[in-house]
Image: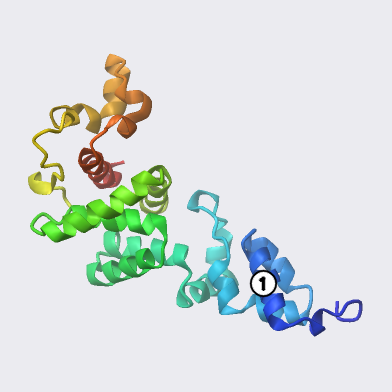
Amino acid sequence: MERFCNASELPRDVCVVIAIKVATTSIEDLCRFRMTCCVARDVGDDDTVLRMVVIPPLHDMNWVWIRDPIGRRFFERCIEIGHPELLFREALRELYIRRNHAVGWEMLQNVARNGLDAAKYALSMELLLQRDDRDAKKEGLELFRTLEAGNLLPACYSSCFAVLTISWPDEVQIPDKGEEHTVCDSTRCLTRGHMGLLYDYRRRAAERGSIHGVGGANHIRCIRCRADYEVERFVDIARV
């Protein structure tokens, strides 16, 4: 390519911007881009580019990439330089599959701190499960409230569901939900007495034609009860 264009004369920062644009389209496009010239191959390995490469959902993942030594090295390199999506998946595996709680907890906090919404959701669930720590529950509820306000909860739950069920359905070990996990402590809440219905709204909606089967948790007006419902659903991932 160098024989037909002046790509080698472009400033490196411009080439990096181009590479990032390509990387955020697909891994395949990044691989094709790296094959075009020496400059593209060089910037395609830049940490900034690899940190931005789009990772396909697990159900769309081509497992040949993971089994292949080159593909395995690629993903390992992305994890080493701090790719948020891959670090999030590793954090959930450490927490709920390998049972390395200290490692997984630190990884999850770091990814959430870097702004990944799905990591914030999982972190909020973990915090809300802290039965004896009121400060942790408060922090978890604040995180949850922010995600709920941005209508991000369905996508966040789907991300967790994919990691914890698609690849390792028999190995997931979500923490037990104790009787004291309940978040809502408002005496004026009108939802509390009906949470049993909402927890299992899909089955009960089919049996009774309940309105709660239409939007599910969207019908829970109390933010605390909504968080309580999400904790129940999150813990039930392991039983799917």
Instruction: Say which quadrant the N terminus sits in.
Output: bottom right
Identify the amino acid type marked 1: Val
Identify the residue position indicated by label 1 in the image.
Answer: 17
Disc 1 element: helix
Question: Furthest-top residue in view?
Answer: 208
Does residue 196 appear in this view? Answer: yes
The image shows residue 163, relative to residue 49, as above or below, that is above
The image shows residue 57, relative to residue 27, as above or below, that is above
Q: Position of residue 37 (x, y in %)?
A: 79, 78
Q: Neighbour class for label 1 at 10 Å: few (<14), some, many (≥20)?
A: some
Q: Position of residue 42 (x, y in %)?
A: 68, 82
Of 139 and 131, nearer the camera is 139
Q: Position of residue 189 (x, y in %)?
A: 15, 33
Taking 130 as reference, is 34 left or right?
right
Q: Position of residue 140 (x, y in %)?
A: 23, 55
Q: Quadrant of residue 102?
A: bottom left
Which residue is found at the position 60% from the left and 73% from the top?
49
Which residue is found at the position 15% from the left and 42% from the top?
184
Q: Quadrant of residue 123?
A: bottom left
Does residue 171 appear in this view? Answer: no
Taking 226 as reference, is 71 left or right?
right
The image shows residue 146, relative to residue 240, as above or below, that is below
Q: Looking at the image, what colour scheme do you see?
A: rainbow
Question: Furthest-front residue in view?
Answer: 188
Instruction: Say which quadrant the C terminus sits in.
Output: top left
Which residue is found at the position 81% from the left and 84% from the top?
9
